[in-house]
Amino acid sequence: MDIPRIFNITESAHRIHNPITPEKLATLGAALRLESGTRVLDLGSGSGEMLCTWARDYGVIATGIDLSQLFTEQAKLRAEELGVADQVRFIHGDAAVYVADEKAGVAAFLGATWIGGGVAGTVDLLVQSLRPGGIILSGEPYWQQLPPTEDVVKGCLAHSISDFLTLPELLASFGHLGYDVVEMVLADQDGWDRYEAAKWLTMRRWLEANPGDELAKEVRAQLTSEPGRYAAYTREYLGWGVFALMPRR
Ligand code: SAH
């Protein structure tokens, strides 16, 4: 049970598998006014950077679940490195079926929306693990600029323009689901560069170490085309942000 191997290759050196930076993760933690002892649940926790740094900086108690064995191992090592292994727990598994025994004050899915089959389904899943007054965090892409042509849609690796909303539409969509948006921290192009450009050096080094691998051709092709594709499309047209939601009552 794991994610497609290509991601374990291209993102093996990432601490954060999204366009958000360490500084912005800290900003987010501060914006949420996290208190020591707050329970945080993270579905698709990747290499655990958010939970480990929040445990260190804000004293949260956290659980992360991720389908990548590699990322989960890296998350456990990071917890040791930051001295928070007694505060954070990382589980290798499918987050789609996970409901916490102890309700969380913050429940997150950052760039892992497919876990519950879309935003609505993932929010429904997380709310089952949320204590009253708790906050859900949704990390989502949106159209920074509407794509003028079908080529731009495809260049952003979207199937159709309807794959994403504009920022005002995305904020409104949370309202339609019955949630107040109570905070947000948005990524910027530097953050996108850290996420996307970091894959290139990883791919280059992996190719040198694994020339005969069955995925070598695919990785070679990506390394050749990705910088140009990314600069022309994703970097210009896609935004990304973390949105803090509370159920309306
Ligand atoms: N939230 C992390 C990782 C985002 S990338 C961060 O911001 O760094 C998306 C993550 O979802 C990957 O780590 C991938 O392994 C994980 N994932 C994909 N499907 C999953 C599933 N069904 N259950 C748990 N994790 C899943």
Image: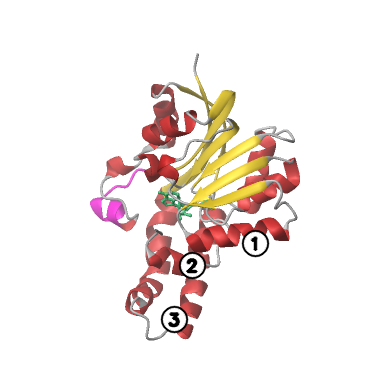
The answer to whether mark 3 is within 8 Å of ligand 1 is: no
Rendered view: 230 above or below 219: above
Residue that appears at 51% across and 64% down: 70
Q: Quadrant of the N terminus?
A: bottom left
The answer to whether mark 2 is within 8 Å of ligand 1 is: no
Mark positioned earlier in the residue sequence (3 or 1): 1
Cα distance between the residues tagged 2 and 3: 12 Å
Magenta stretch?
A: 145-154
Residue that appears at 38% across and 57% down: 233
Front position in the image: 221 or 146: 221
- With 166 as the anchor, is 19 left or right in this view? right
Residue that appears at 53% across and 60% down: 71
Residue position marked by numbered label 1 in the rendering: 77
* Residue type (three-letter) at the residue carrying disc 3: Leu
Q: Residues within 10 Å of mark 1 (few under 14, many from 20)?
A: some
- Residue 206 visible in image: yes
Cα distance between the residues tagged 3 and 1: 25 Å
Residue position marked by numbered label 2 in the rendering: 199
Rendered view: 169 above or below 88: above
- Residue 182 visible in image: no
Mark positioned earlier in the residue sequence (2 or 1): 1
Q: Nearer the viewer, mark 2 or mark 3?
A: 3
Residue 165 in the image, given as x and y percentages of width and height: 36, 37
Front position in the image: 154 or 90: 90
**Colour scheme in the image?**
secondary structure
Q: Residue 14 appears in which quarter of the rendering?
A: bottom right
Residue position marked by numbered label 3 in the rendering: 207
Front position in the image: 171 or 138: 138
Residue that appears at 51% across and 48% down: 65
Q: Which mark is residue 247?
A: none
